[in-house]
Amino acid sequence: MEVLKSLPLYFLVVALATFSSTIFAQDGDSISAEETQFQTVEWVDLIPPEVLEILLNPPAYISEIEDGSPEDQITSQISNATLEEEEDVYQRALASTDVNTELDGQSVRIPGFVVPLEFDEAQTISQFFLVPYFGACLHMPPPPPNQIILVDAPAGVQMAALYEPFWIEGQISTTVSENDMAKSAYAMQLHRLTPYRE
């Protein structure tokens, strides 16, 4: 398989490989009636089909970028773009806020990693980003906005390890929000957070 040169395409493949193969491995598990209220979605479901098609078919110049070079960073790709590249459909897809409108208002269950935004002295988290891969927004550039969910947890949640994935359940909405860390195209009111298990 050809080495992926684009971080957004890379995170998409990693997220799908990490979660898609294991979501359906839980068929033997007992699922409570409460869990059946929530439709399990994958990260790829949040991307509209036309945007996903663009991301999966990057233009030729992407494959010409040398691994580890300054151009290999998504922020560099966007900030150093020429006028023609700014109009490039692929570049727009990398920063897309386009959403899957069919998910708006749905009760969903999705696995991901927590990036805390608001927390108190006791480290109780009341607002966070849910992202498809570990380190997003903290150690690596953020994913496209349509791959970030802003989660409000008024009751607060505590977690021992942020490097572990969690299942998040709640009602999702197609609401664009932005802060110093990143922009999200989805929002959710947290119903339940549970450790992700295979």
Image (cartoon, rainbow, N blue to C red):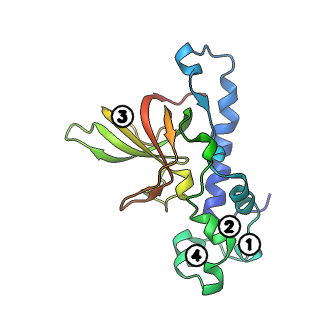
Label 2 vs label 4, nearer the camera: 4
Q: Which of marks 2 and 1 is nearer the N terminus?
A: 2
> In the image, which disc is placed on residue 77?
4
Question: What residue is disc 1 on?
Answer: 63
Dots 2, 1 in contact, CB < 8 A: yes
Q: Which residue is drawn at 61% across and 79% down?
A: 86
Quadrant position of residue 73: bottom right
Q: Distance between the residues labelled 2 and 1?
A: 6 Å
Can residue 135 be seen at all in this image of the molecule? yes
Q: Please tell me whether mark 1 sits on a helix, a strand or a loop.
A: helix
Q: Earlier in the sequence, mark 2 or mark 4?
A: 2
Q: In this view, does 135 lie to the left or right of 54?
A: left
* 77 vs 72, nearest the viewer: 77
Compared to residue 115, the image places residue 141 above or below, namely below
Q: Residue at x 61, y 46 (%)?
A: 101
Question: What residue is disc 3 on?
Answer: 160
Compared to residue 28, the image places residue 117 above or below, namely below
User: What kind of residue is marked 4?
Assistant: Gln
Q: Earlier in the sequence, mark 3 or mark 4?
A: 4
Quadrant position of residue 64: bottom right
Location of residue 23 in the rendering, given as x and y in whole percent from the top left corner: 65, 31
> In the image, which disc is placed on residue 52?
none
Location of residue 27 in the rendering, given as x and y in whole percent from the top left corner: 69, 20
Label 3 vs label 4, nearer the camera: 4
User: Pointer 4: residues within 10 angstroms few (<14), some, or many (20+)?
Assistant: some
Question: What residue is disc 2 on?
Answer: 5
User: What kind of residue is marked 3?
Assistant: Ala
User: What kind of residue is marked 2?
Assistant: Lys
Q: Which of marks 1 and 4 is nearer the N terminus?
A: 1
* 76 vs 94, nearest the viewer: 94
